[in-house]
Image: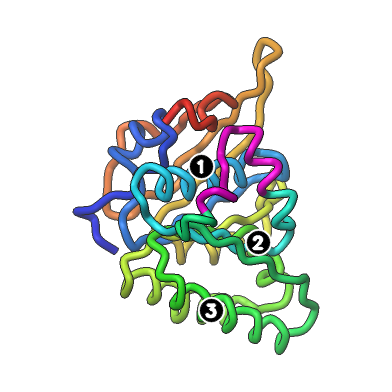
Amino acid sequence: MSIEKTSPTGIEPLDNALGGGLYRGSLTLVEGPTGSGKTLLSSKFLYFGAFNLSEKSIYASMSLSKKFFYSYLSSFSMDFEKLEKRNLFKFLEFPTVVHKEALKEMMNSMMMEFIEFEPKRLAIDPINPLLSLLDPIEIRATIHNTLKKYLEKYEVTGLIVVDTPEERLDPMFREIEFLSDMVLLMHKKYKEEETKFEVNVLKYRGKNIMRHKVELTLEDFYLHKI
């Protein structure tokens, strides 16, 4: 992780709060209930890097189809299909797995795709299948020994997304937070008939930030806001 270099998310209020963005080569956990804006934030981070900075980006999905992803994000003026044609973006779609051996094969395949494509940004959304099949020791080995070492070696800025209940009582969530360099907790709120997304910065390793809570609107995710 390089604390001298940052990877801006392209979401201005969040970048301002974080002092420019996320550390290059770091791992950020984006967690929150379903519908709290986690996929929007992750997608904007990837799109900004590819479209504005010509940084290759990968979105590894364990839930959404490529067709739905492209269609959904196009409504926010993010044309991932065009980026794919320019070889700046790659969508990886993985099936739901129910056995550890299948999960191991899937993770190996994912890492090979990462190494071959040479991205500078990536997002895995969501990693809940790992949490349901692996115990805390196996989670630590997978994230620390495999994913984090890859990010640091190649200076890739990575996001992992986790769907969490409001209470977040499962100790597995604490394990993931401990392993991550940054932790962003998201919630959706409604104020004066407008949808708001609250981002709580629970952790930012190696840096004291000015603001630990950022409020976003849907407009902050549109391409014209970059």
The answer to whether residue 78 is magenta is yes
Instruction: Identify the residue shown where x is 62% and y is 58%.
Output: 125
Q: Where does residue 48 sit, x and y in percent of width and height?
A: 43, 43
Identified by mark 1, the residue type is Lys
In the foreground, 197 or 119:
119
Q: Which mark is residue 142?
A: 3
Check disc 1: other Cα within 10 Å, few if <14, some if 14-19, many if 20+: many
Q: Is residue 106 left or right of residue 213?
A: right
Look at the numbered disc 1 and give the secondary structure of its residue: helix
Instruction: Identify the residue shown where x is 73% and y is 52%.
Output: 67
Q: Quadrant of the N terminus?
A: bottom left
Q: Which residue was labeled with disc 2?
A: 61
User: Which contiguous range is marked in magenta?
Assistant: 70-83
**Which-is-in-front pick, marks 3 and 2?**
2
Q: CA distance from mark 3 to mark 2?
A: 17 Å
Identified by mark 3, the residue type is Thr
Contact (CB < 8 A) between labels 1 and 3?
no
Q: Chief secondary structure of the magenta span?
A: helix
Q: Which residue was labeled with disc 1?
A: 44
Instruction: Identify the residue shown where x is 75% and y is 71%.
Output: 95
Check disc 3: other Cα within 10 Å, few if <14, some if 14-19, many if 20+: some
Identified by mark 2, the residue type is Ser
First in residue order: circle 1 vs circle 2: 1
Q: Where does residue 118 sit, x and y in percent of width and height?
A: 40, 70
Look at the numbered disc 3 and give the secondary structure of its residue: helix
Q: CA distance from mark 1 to mark 2?
A: 15 Å
- Give the answer, above or below, for where 84 lies relative to 192: below
Please tell me in which quadrant of the rendered image residue 90 appears.
Answer: bottom right
* Residue with the most extreme top position: 192
* Residue with the most extreme front position: 85
Q: Where does residue 206 sit, x and y in percent of width and height?
A: 27, 54
First in residue order: circle 3 vs circle 2: 2
